[in-house]
């Protein structure tokens, strides 16, 4: 069997994709997963979240298999993690979204080795000509110059301080951070300049930086959100294979809280018919561990992530595929995803309403979200550019 590339025909008139029922989409997913050019064999992707590596959505050609008559049994090696050093010109990313609590963020890495099958950031790899499937978790872009760039941007006379979010797209504490230590370098700059930061992670590695985060929290400059998706170890291994175990994440909440660092628990994402029954259990355990704020996000499937998630369900939960997307479309106005501000995080309709009320009731009963920990911006001190010439005064 040989793999070749075939040009994708382009329609000169752009149109909206044809809406498909959950059953039609499920059958299409099953056909895709029967294609040897599409599905990646289990031994090759051991320890990875995605089960496929579809062609990037901006690419002019796609892979297809054909029988060339040889049919050689060839064992391919497991997929390694490749780190590509990136040298951006700026490091602070701005946004104007009204439904998130920050207007700027830093992502030390692009792509994420955690391999979470549901990650809404997967389609961003398409901008690099790569797949939102296995490419996203095996080809990681690192930005080792981020701390220096940050210091330069904070030094600008026009800069006005506001909370910087770390981990808004990909996890700042994914495994390669142990080697590159970019996130720690960023925190050191923010600590020196008294700049507020909010961190979102599902990694226990954040406890490595408790020394910095404790100092910042004492000045009301830092808080951390830990994402907990499930307490089922089997589901966690399938869904987020290289992320910290559920028990380890709870322990991380406890260690951060004991160090005096404000901790939020995120029940995210909530996947219909997969982990939606765990909302109350996760909130209760996180509250006992020391979390005092909480939030949730309904599964988001922008762009080609819809197909990546369907492929994952075909592999691991084929009997639930139709049900998952039926509920999801109910909460997304009949579509797989609705990117509209204000509803993209929580959805609409009866199912979404029920999830919201369950979350609010459990949070209120536990005493979560009684107060919001506001970070200070009035302590900010711009960094001073080092100069070889000493001051006369």
Image (cartoon, rainbow, N blue to C red):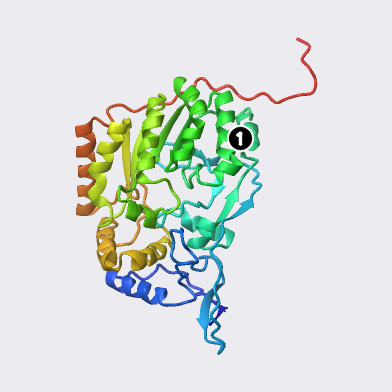
Rendering coords of residue 71 (x, y %): 54, 85
Q: Is residue 300 above or below residue 38?
A: above
Asked whether residue 201 appears in the rendered view, the answer is yes
Q: How many marks do you count on the picture? A: 1
Rendering coords of residue 96 (x, y %): 46, 42
Rendering coords of residue 104 (x, y %): 50, 38
Residue located farthest toward the bottom when viewing the structure as drawn: 69
Q: Quadrant of the C terminus?
A: top right
Q: Residue at x 23, y 50 (%)?
A: 277
Q: Quadrant of residue 296?
A: top left
Q: Residue at x 58, y 39 (%)?
A: 181
Crowd tier of the residue under label 1, counting other residues whose Cα lies within 10 Å: few below 14, some 14–19, many 20 or above: some
Q: Is residue 282 above or below residue 377?
A: below
Rendering coords of residue 55 (x, y %): 51, 68
Q: Residue under label 1, please give it.
A: 150
Left or right of 250 in this view: 162: right
Q: Nearer the viewer, residue 298 or 101?
A: 298
Residue located farthest toward the top when viewing the structure as drawn: 393
Q: Nearer the viewer, residue 17 or 319?
A: 319
Q: Nearer the viewer, residue 154 or 358?
A: 358
Asked whether residue 8 appears in the rendered view, the answer is no
Left or right of 74 in this view: 28: left
Q: Residue at x 64, y 49 (%)?
A: 86
Q: Is residue 338 above or below residue 198?
A: below
Question: Please, what secondary structure does the residue beneath circle 1 have?
Answer: helix
């Amino acid at each position: 069997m040989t793999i070749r590339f075939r040009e994708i025909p382009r329609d000169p008139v752009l149109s909206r994709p044809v809406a498909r029922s959950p059953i039609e989409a499920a059958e299409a997913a099953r056909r895709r997963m029967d294609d040897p050019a599409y599905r990646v064999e289990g031994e090759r992707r051991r320890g990875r979240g995605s089960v496929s590596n579809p062609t990037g959505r901006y690419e002019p050609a796609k892979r297809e298999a054909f029988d060339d008559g040889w049919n050689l049994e060839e064992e391919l090696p497991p997929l390694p993690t490749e780190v590509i050093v990136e040298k951006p010109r700026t490091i602070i990313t701005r946004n104007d979204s009204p439904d998130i609590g920050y207007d700027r963020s830093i992502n030390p890495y692009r792509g994420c080795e955690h391999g979470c099958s549901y990650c809404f950031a997967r389609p961003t790899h398409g901008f690099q000509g790569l797949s939102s499937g296995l490419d996203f978790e095996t080809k990681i872009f690192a930005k080792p110059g981020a701390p220096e760039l940050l210091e330069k941007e904070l030094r600008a006379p026009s800069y006005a301080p506001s909370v910087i979010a770390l981990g808004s797209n990909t996890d700042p504490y994914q495994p390669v951070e142990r080697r590159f230590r970019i996130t720690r370098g960023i925190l050191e700059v923010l600590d020196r300049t008294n700049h507020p930061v909010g961190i979102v992670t599902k990694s226990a590695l954040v406890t490595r930086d408790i020394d910095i985060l404790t100092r910042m929290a004492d000045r009301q400059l830092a808080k951390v959100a830990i994402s907990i998706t499930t307490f089922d170890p089997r589901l966690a291994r399938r869904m987020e294979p290289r992320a910290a175990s559920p028990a380890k994440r709870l322990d991380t909440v406890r260690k951060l809280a004991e160090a005096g660092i404000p901790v939020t628990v995120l029940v995210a994402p909530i996947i219909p018919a997969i982990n939606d029954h765990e909302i109350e259990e996760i909130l209760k355990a996180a509250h006992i561990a020391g979390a005092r704020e909480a939030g949730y996000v309904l599964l988001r499937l922008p762009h080609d992530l819809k197909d990546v998630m369907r492929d994952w369900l075909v592999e691991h939960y084929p009997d639930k595929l139709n049900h998952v997307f039926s509920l999801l479309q109910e909460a997304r106005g009949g579509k797989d995803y609705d990117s509209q501000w204000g509803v993209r995080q929580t959805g609409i309709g009866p199912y979404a309403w029920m999830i919201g009320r369950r979350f609010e009731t459990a949070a209120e009963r536990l005493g979560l979200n009684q107060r919001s920990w506001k970070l200070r911006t009035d302590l900010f001190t711009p960094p001073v550019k080092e100069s070889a010439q000493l001051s006369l005064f």
